[in-house]
Image: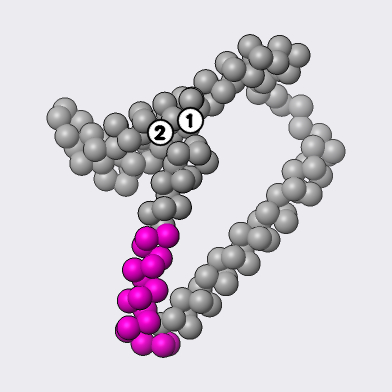
């Protein structure tokens, strides 16, 4: 429900901040980024309120208590995720190189399919609030 509200606010504000409708200045990509940040702030505040109400024993707060064990845990989780992202990026670049070598028809067909998949992927990620 909260992510739906955040996506709704993002969707409603996008035309105003991106295109400069009404009293808002035309910001383009910066406006799109600003609406994303506003949506994320709404999600964080709403989900924090739910966690505090449903699980009072959990304390959600900022901390400066970062020790070596915490850093090890973050690296243990983050390095494999980073490696996955890097290998996916390199694989995607290699795939694009191969597609472009096959000629204009293959590149066009690939592009159309990829645009459709990007639209579906963006809609699903947006609705899930990720």
Q: Position of residue 27 (x, y in %)?
A: 26, 41
Instruction: Tell me which segment is drawn in magenta.
Output: 101-117
Badge 1, how many Cα within 10 Å: few under 14, some, many 20+?
many
Residue 77, image x, y percentages: 75, 48
Relative to 90, say whether 45 is above or below: above
Residue pointed to by mark 2: 7
In the rendered image, residue 72, in percent from the top left (x then y), is placed at 81, 44
Expressed as whole percent of the image width and height from the top left, the position of residue 69 reads 84, 38
Q: Nearer the viewer, residue 94 or 26?
A: 94
Q: Residue furthest bottom?
A: 102
Q: Residue at x 83, y 39 (%)?
A: 68
Q: Residue at x 66, y 60 (%)?
A: 84
Q: Nearer the viewer, residue 93 or 64?
A: 93
Q: Observer-nearest residue: 55 or 21? A: 55
Q: For the residues marked 2 and 1, what is the alpha-carbon distance in whole angstroms? A: 6 Å
Asked whether residue 123 appears in the rendered view, the answer is yes
Name the element at disc 1.
helix
Colour setup of the view: one colour
**In the image shown, does 85 or 67 lie closer to the viewer?**
85
Query: What crowding class fits label 2: few (fewer than 14 Cα within 10 Å), some (14-19), or many (20 or more)?
Result: many
Is 108 rendered above or below residue 88? below
Image point (49%, 37%), residue name: 129
Contact? badges 2 and 1 (CB < 8 Å)? yes
Residue under label 1, please give it.
3
Residue drawn at x 15%, y 30% as measured from the top left: 22
Magenta span contains residue 51: no
């Amino acid at each position: 429900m909260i992510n739906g509200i955040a996506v709704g606010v993002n969707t409603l504000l996008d035309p105003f901040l991106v295109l400069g409708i009404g009293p808002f200045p035309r910001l383009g990509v910066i406006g799109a980024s600003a609406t994303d940040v506003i949506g994320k702030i709404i999600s964080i505040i709403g989900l924090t309120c739910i966690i505090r109400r449903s699980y009072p024993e959990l304390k959600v707060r900022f901390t400066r208590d970062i020790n070596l064990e915490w850093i090890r845990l973050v690296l243990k989780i983050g390095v494999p995720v980073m490696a996955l992202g890097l290998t996916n990026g390199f694989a995607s670049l290699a795939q694009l190189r191969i597609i472009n070598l096959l000629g204009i028809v293959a590149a066009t067909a690939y592009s159309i399919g990829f645009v459709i998949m990007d639209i579906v992927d963006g809609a699903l990620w947006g609705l899930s609030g990720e």
